[in-house]
Amino acid sequence: MLLDAEESQLVLVDYQERLMPVIHDGPAVLANARRLAQMAKMAQVPIFGTEQNPRRLGPNDAQVRELCDRTLAKMHFSAVADGLAEWLAPPPTAPRGNARSLPRHLQKSQPASGERPSIVIAGCEAHVCLLQTALELIDEEFEIWVVTDACGSRTERSRDAAFDRLAGAGAELVTAEMVAFEWLRTCEHPSFKPMLGLIK
């Protein structure tokens, strides 16, 4: 199964100014997050950010924040508890046809138009906010793609434990470059050259 840009949304979790200095390999993690957001813009993939307790930890990195379409301030470690799933899933349309044609318990709402079930997610800390958000999105029946080289924790062990647990829960583990080439699919894509410039 490959990622499809038209079915994808990008979620960037807590790349906050006061948090990033303590993240293992923080500069590389942040650089990959910025690159991922730029590639999402080129591929016309919606981008959502989250900020954990921004009064204490400050806002997200300015470049990340600017690239996000919307940013959710949260107090729960999982952004789903503060409403992220509602941002990612448009409401279903009302049942079609005459309301009397079927008993109410058999009437089903139609899938929402413009649905994007593939959530590409990255963030910090991998073993706390990223993990809890991704697991709850899996519970909400989204397909989860964790961009490992754009995720970080204070220690490598905590980050890797999060990846093990996410893979066991059904998330796909990918890299930013894998995401880019799957969104592109072909070297004839209009964004191929600029995206290749970001990767190199």
Image (tube, rainbow, N blue to C red):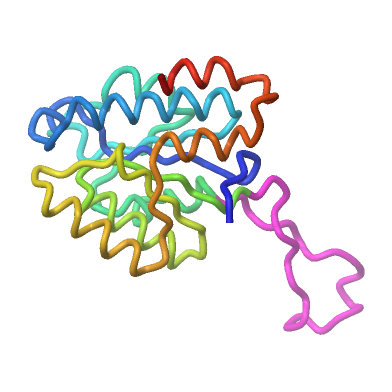
> Residue, x 40% and y 47% (percent of image)?
174
Q: Quadrant of the C terminus?
A: top left
**How many dots with numbers?**
0
Residue plotted at (53% across, 24% down): 41
Residue drawn at point x = 50 percent, y = 45 percent:
87
Relative image position of residue 9 (x, y in whole percent) = 52, 42
The image position of residue 182, as x and y in percent, is 56, 40
Q: Name the one closer to the observer, 70 or 44.
A: 44
Residue 125 in the magenta stretch? The answer is: no
Which of the 4 image quarters holds residue 27?
A: top left
The foreground one among 156 and 70 is 156
Task: Please provide the residue range marked out in magenta.
Answer: 89-115
Q: Where's residue 194, x and y in %?
A: 54, 15
Query: Does 32 sit left or right of 68 as displayed?
Result: left
Residue 26, image x, y percentages: 17, 30
Is 110 within the magenta?
yes
Q: Nearer the viewer, residue 8 or 52?
A: 8
For the stretch drawn in magenta, what is the main secondary structure?
A: loop
Q: Quadrant of the N terminus?
A: bottom right
Up/down of 175 relative to 69, above or below = below
